[in-house]
Image (tube, grey):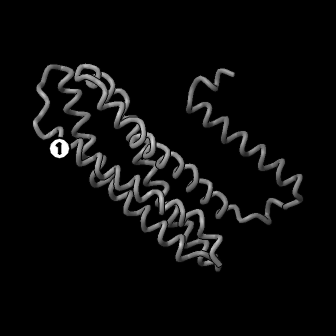
Amino acid sequence: MKFLEDPMQTMGAGFALAVVLIVVFLGISGIGAGEADWFGVLMRWVHFLAGITWIGLLYFFNLINAAFLKSLDGPTKNVVIPKLMPAALNWFRHGATVTVLAGIVLYFYLYSKGGTGAIALGIGGLLGIIMMANVHAIIWPNQKKIIAAVSAAAQGTPAPAEMAQWGRTALLASRVNFLLSIPMLFFMGAGSHFK
C-alpha cells in the first residue's frame, strides 16, 4: 500500500478504482456503455472534483488557516508560509478555474438538451464566477506578494509596510468568497430539484 504515502499516487489509484467500479456498475445495472451520456457524466465529475478541491481549501483557509497563521510568531511564519501557501494556493486557484470552466461547459451542454433548474444553476454559477474573479484578481495577487515578502524576510530583508494591507485585502476577499459559497452551493445542489 505504498501508493497511499504519495497523494498523487493515491489520486491515480482513486481514478483507477472509479473506472473499475463504473464497469461493475454498468454490468450490474444492465446499462450499456453506449447508453450513458459520458460527456455529461465526465463534465459533472470534473466539476465536482475541482469544486470540492476549491471550496474545501476555501473553508480550510477561512476556518483554520487564517487563525493559525495569526497565532504564529514572525520567525515561524517565515518558515510556514513559503512552504505551505504556494502549493495550497496553486490547488486553490486552479481548482477555481477548472470548476468554473467545467461548470460553464456543463451548464450549456445540459440546457441545450432541455435540462431543468437553469435559473437556480445560473444563480449558483454567477456566484461561482464572482468567486473565481476574487481568487484571480484579488486573493492570489496579494498572497503572491505576501509569499515573496515573507520569503525575503526569512533571508533578512525587512517586511514591507504594505504587507499587512495585502493580507487584509486577501482575507476580506476570501471571506466574501466564504460568504458567497453558502448560497452558491445551495443553488448548485438545488438546481435539478426545481422543475
Inspect this view and state whether residue 35 appears: yes
Q: Is residue 54 above or below residue 107?
A: above
* Residue 63 on image: x %, y %: 42, 41
Circle 1: element type: helix
Would residue 183 appear left or right of 176 to someone viewing this image? Answer: right
How many marks the image carries: the answer is 1
Q: From the image, tell me which residue sits under label 1.
A: 165
> Is 191 in front, or is 30?
191
What is the quadrant of the C terminus in the image?
A: bottom right
Q: Estimate the x, y position of residue 168 in percent, counting from the top left.
A: 23, 45
Q: Residue at x 23, y 48 (%)?
A: 169
Mark 1: amino acid:
Gln
Residue 189 image offset from top left, x and y in percent: 59, 62
Q: Position of residue 127 (x, y in %)?
A: 42, 64
Up the image or down, 149 lies above or below 50; here it is above
The residue under the point 42% across, 45% down is 92
Left/right of residue 176 with respect to residue 122 in the rendered view: left
